[in-house]
Amino acid sequence: MTDTIFALVTAWGALVIFASSFLSCLALPIPTSLMMLSGGAFVAAGDLALWQVMAGAWGGAVLGDQTGYLIGRHGGAPLVDRIARSPARRAVLDRARKLVDRKGGLGVFFSTWLFAPLGPWANFIAGTAGLSWLRFTIWDVLGETIWVTAYVGLGYGFASQIEAVSDILGNAVGLLAALAVVVAMALWIRGALKAQKARRRVDHPAPGL
């Protein structure tokens, strides 16, 4: 796959990075992260300009996110229900919905880089849920800036080890997601224990009270 992506970037430059970034934000299974890593490597080799790679990746991502948001905004719940007919898509949509419902714009921000597999689905959900366009855009632009800068920068810094870096990042994203779940569970357990202690105080007040 790496050789194919290198060939595409060689032939089309920042244009193919823009296209892959745009389409992946609409939930198409395209290895955009590897595209950006490759773009960074070509910048390091002097074959592409940094501003072109960054603009292509960032512009495609933001435009793709905006398209997904507008699809959700105007397609509404019926569209999401149609997408959710597949059990796998329903599961990822439910996760995206929980993220956006609980965190709002911050959930969109995290979905662009920390929970990147949820990103396209979070765009649909944000539009369907009526999250304001300005709020969505601000958090989305900030998140995509982190995503693009990280991957292009790593591609530039580790130009000779692109495939290894891609594997490491895939594992790192999975680890971060797992850690986020663990932290959330720990906070929930802590809250539940506090609530239980509070109920005990009410049911069994201290002597003399």
Image (cartoon, rainbow, N blue to C red):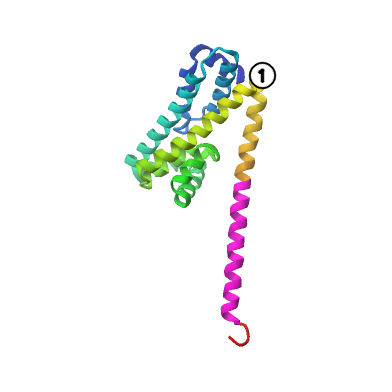
69 displayed left or right of 161: left
User: 46 left or right of 136?
Assistant: right
Label 1: few (<14), some (14–19) or many (≥20) C-alpha neighbours in 10 Å: some
Q: Is residue 116 magenta?
A: no
Residue at x 43%, y 27% (from the top left corner): 59
* Left or right: 56 in relation to 47: left
Residue 93, compared with residue 68, is above or below; it is: below
Give yes or no for residue 189 being in the magenta stretch. Answer: yes
30 shown above or below 200:
above
Res. 42 image quadrant: top right
Say what amino acid the circle numbered 1 marks.
Ser
Q: Residue at x 41, y 39 (%)?
A: 138
The C terminus lies in quadrant: bottom right
Q: Quadrant of residue 150?
A: top right
For the point 42% across and 44% down, the residue is 125
Per the image, label 1 sits on a secondary structure element best described as helix
Q: Which one is in front, 94 or 142?
A: 142
Start and end of the magenta stretch? 179-205
70 is higher (above) or lower (below) than 1: below
Q: Could one spot residue 82 in this view of the protein?
A: no
Q: Tell me residue 92's x, y (percent).
A: 51, 43
Q: Pick the quarter of the image with the N terminus.
A: top right
Is residue 62 visible to us here?
Answer: yes
Residue 30 screen position, x and y as percent: 52, 27
Name the spot of residue 192 as percent of width and height, x first: 59, 65
Examine the residues drawn in magenta and state their main secondary structure. Answer: helix
Q: Which residue is mark 1?
A: 160
- What is the x, y in percent for residue 200? 60, 76
